[in-house]
Image: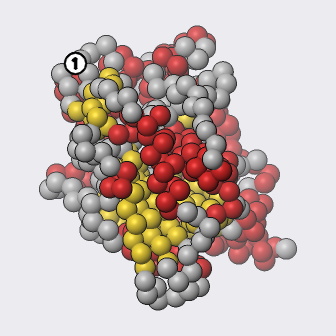
Amino acid sequence: MKRKIVKAGFMESSMRIMAGNVTCNTFYILLNANKNFKIDAFKKGLNLFVQDMPIFTCSLAKGKWRDKWVPIEDYDINKIVEVFNMKNPSSVDKASCCDEMFLQFSALKEKHIDIQKEAPLKVKIFNNEKTGDKLIVFCVHHCLSDGRGWMQTIKLIGSYYDAVLNNKTIKLEKNYRKMSKFVFSVSLSDYLRTIKGLSKPSKLQTMKPVLDTSGIKAASIDYNDTSIEKIIITEEQLNSIKKHYKAYNFTVNDILMHLVMKITDRYNLSLKEPNSYIGTGALVDLRRYFKKDVLSIANYFALESLEVDRSCIENLPKLAEELSAFKKRPLGLSFICPILLTSIFPVSTLEKIIGGMMEGFAVQSYMGLATTNFGKFDEYIAPYGSCIEGGAAIPSAGVHGFPSILVSSCKGIRTLYFIKYNDKDNLTREIKNQLNELLTELYSSEKAAQ
């Protein structure tokens, strides 16, 4: 294996700097497997994969000019893949078994990744020895890649797994990691529109947090104190919910944005002087600007915020107009363009710049709920064959304000995960219950109308 020190990009350094202050940068990709999944073949395939892409065997070392991905001397695939055998599961029912394995994963200590000491990927496999069912948890780190890049990684590892089973070889395509791939994909007109938009005053500056911000000054984050909740939506339920928004051509993302704005407004109305605007946001995949699909295990993400007059929440035609205008923006550029300028500075200076922005980032997390969508898993699990029966993802979590929410879909089932650290007020469960209540109302009203 050719293992050498690799220069880190400024987005990778930015995620390192933010860890522990704004977010925990570990997120989790879950795959449900049946008895046909071969753990030994998976380990062999993963080992072949990291030999071809040795950056996965490195930790991220802090630098003065640039951070560096440095090979871990004692890297061992048998330490990276940890198997937990459940000899006496309380149930052999598949659904109950999956829940039990997930609870065992949730209870694990040190399941986050310390990127300055560990590699950006480790795998936990929970095995029901009675039925052969398994829960595969990919613990992955944001410093190396965003969600879409990690899904490409899962797909690649599946190809290596298949190659081991069927005695094939893999020819690895070029992986695009540099931000220049994005920079030169964006049109000049989109850059000009972004610059013009940046000159306008932001509604966000006039808005007050809708949650008590005293937690910003709280003690250091306990990464083992994690609150995780989920909602599962079947295809039948989703189709029924979508009928409520059919006249306005709302996508699943639009529906979720509407619902989280409704929840945010509940907290807003508890203020002595409520905000006139409600804010939400979403993560944007900057690959939308690429001319063609390429392997891009890297950080090509950006945030995009949306602030609407709170009267729009109960006025769907007006909200549909706001969402339509939102989608016509050069999404993500207003976030990433100012950050691009920081890439000319050494990482030691970048650390000071981002450090000075930390409290502002934290305060924004108290202003409203936002969602992330990983989309459909089906394409990414295809190389594993029929041994994978489902999948979902848990986002990297904020350590202040509202919990993080992520939706993903696999084989007709959509799963929403909610996660937060140091959740002393049980806000994660509270938000899950409120969103579940709204979804149930929509589902029930459409069923009654049939």
Residue 443, percent across and down?
70, 71
Element marked by disc 1:
loop
Residue at the top extreme, as displayed: 188
Residue sitting at x 76%, y 47%? 249
Left or right: 207 in relation to 322? left
Left or right: 420 in relation to 392? left
Amino acid carrying label 1: it is: Trp
Foreground of the two, 206 or 44:
44
Is 180 rendered above or below residue 113? above
Residue sitting at x 43%, y 87%? 88
Left or right: 212 in relation to 181? left
Residue 94, percent across and down?
59, 79
Residue 297, percent across and down?
49, 34
Disc 1 crowd, CA 10 A, few/some/many (<14, 14-19, 20+): few
Is 239 rendered above or below residue 213? below
Residue 22 in view here: no
Q: Which residue is mark 1?
A: 65
Q: Quadrant of the N terminus?
A: top left
Residue 104, percent across and down?
39, 74
Residue at the left extreme, as displayed: 219
